[in-house]
Structure formats: C-alpha cells, structure tokens
Amino acid sequence: MANENINNSYFDGHYKDIWRSIIPTGLTEKETEFMIQYFQLGPGTKVLDLMCGYGRHTLALARQGIEVTAVDNLEDYINEISSVAKQEKLPAKAIKADIIQFHSDESFDLAISMGNSLNFFNEAEILTLLSSVSSRLNKGGQLLINTWSLAEIAIKQFIEKSWNTINGLKYLSDSAYLFHPTRIETETTIISPEGDTEVKQAIDYIFSVAEMEKLLAASGFILKEIYSIPGRKKFQMGEPRAYIVAVKK
C-alpha cells in the first residue's frame, strides 16, 4: 500500500515479544490504577484502547469489569487479546484495523493511547485520528495520551547511537533528529545468538506541548493537564515521559 505508515511493521518479528519484556509489570499496574481512579471507571463504563499492543491495559481494565474495545494493526496481538478475553470471560473485544481508518458505532467514556504510539503519526494523521476519537466520546468524555516524544522530552533525552541486549538478542540503533516535519528516524538492527539479523525502521514525530495543545483543540479537545507521574506529579521540562489528559469540548 502506498503511503503505508512505516511503523506498521515495527512490532512484528522479534520486537513483538521484546516490547512485552521491556515494559515493567508495575508500570502497567500503576497506570491502570490511575485510570480507574482519575477517570472514575467501573462496570458499565466504556474505554477505547487505541494501538493496544498485546493488551496490557485492555486486559487489566477488563478484569475490573470495565468494557474495553482494543484496536491494533498487528494480528498476533489482536488474536492474543481475544483468546485471553474469551478464556477469562472478560468484557473486552479486540479489533484488527488501521487505526487512522478505524470507525465505530459505539460511544466511549475514555480513549487511551499509551506507549508513545500516537507519535507514530504525522500532524495530518493525528488530526484525523483525534477528530474521529472525539466524535465517538460521550459528553464530557476524556482522552489519555502517554508519550515520550514531546519536544520537551526528546530534545534532552535524544541519543544518536545505542546498543542493548534483551532476551539474548542484540539491538543496535542509529537515530537521527530531523526537521520538516520534526521527527526522529531510527534504524534498529536486531541480531540473534545464531547471527541472523532483522532490520527495523521507525519514525517518531515530535510535537511540543504547545503544538499538542493546538492539535487537541483542532480535534475537539481541551488540554486539561500533563503529568510525569500519573495523577501525582505535573510534567516538567526534560522528564522522561508524559501523560496528557484532555477532555472533549
């Protein structure tokens, strides 16, 4: 497909499982606890989990009786969530779809985009996505975005070259901070113990807090708050991650 997002294939292959191993279980628990308390979620409330990955938030919320619709483009993730939800009889459903083209007839109380996934998209795509999300939220519905690609984070945290070993696999990453549009392009080479290699390309689009606020406003949202620790500490320049809370106008 022409113009297909380069990040669409990033999480298949080795990285599909590596992503699971590098996210601490405790982080997911704290994020889920924050969502339930801050957004007053409970049985009967509905959550839309955009770019849900392997369903760490979807399943945690559904285990509390919250109805969750999970959307991702990777079939393996969707099948995994569907299998667990069926086995545990959870109020969760998983849908394989291109997130930009996803539409639903349901209405939701909260939409979430976690794990820096919103920054896979350029300005026009984010406007399309967030406008669609806004139209599906109930009156007073809210949006939670987790990112580490705000300019106020990325400028300080940017590393041009890095390497790591995870689960026996070597990861060598070469990144460039580019402009027009502002973005970080990364090529990662994954080397297995047997010497097999897998090369991944990724783009994270970088937006400042002011630019994010404009994108939210143009999509029907009002920026409510930005945290570095969900619900506890307001975000400050250079902190490693941000949690953006917005409310539907």
Image (spheres, rainbow, N blue to C red):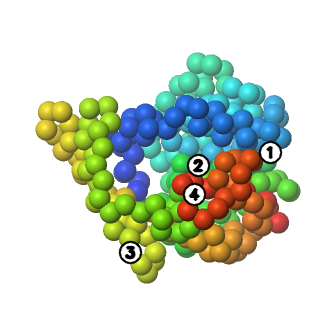
- Amino acid type shown at disc 1: Phe
Q: Earlier in the sequence, mark 4 or mark 1?
A: 1
Report the residue that reaches farthest toward the bottom: 180
| Disc 3 versus disc 2: nearer the observer | 3
The front one of 233 and 189 is: 233
In which quarter of the view is residue 76 placed? top left
Q: Is label 4 or label 1 in front? A: 4
Instruction: Note whether 59 is above or below 46 in the view shown.
Output: above
Tag 4: residue type? Glu
Q: Which residue is mark 3?
A: 178
Q: Vertical placement of 225 versus 109: above or below?
A: below
| Amino acid at pointer 3 | Leu
The residue that label 1 is drawn on is: 39
Q: Nearer the viewer, residue 177 or 204?
A: 177
Q: Name the mark nearer the viewer: 2 or 4.
A: 4
Query: Which percent across, then down, holds residue 134?
Result: 73, 61
Q: Residue 241, how many percent across, how many down? A: 57, 54
User: Reading the chain from its start, which is encountered first: label 1 or label 2?
Assistant: 1
What residue is shown at x 60% (from left), y 53% (from top)? 146
Assess disc 2: are there few (<14), some (14-19) or many (≥20) residues with their C-alpha within 10 Å of its C-alpha.
some
Residue 239 — which label?
Answer: 4
Residue 128 image offset from top left, x and y in percent? 61, 67
**1 or 3: mark nearer the eye:** 3
Q: Residue at x 60, y 41 (%)?
A: 70
Q: Earlier in the sequence, mark 1 or mark 3?
A: 1
Give the quarter of the image for residue 145: bottom right
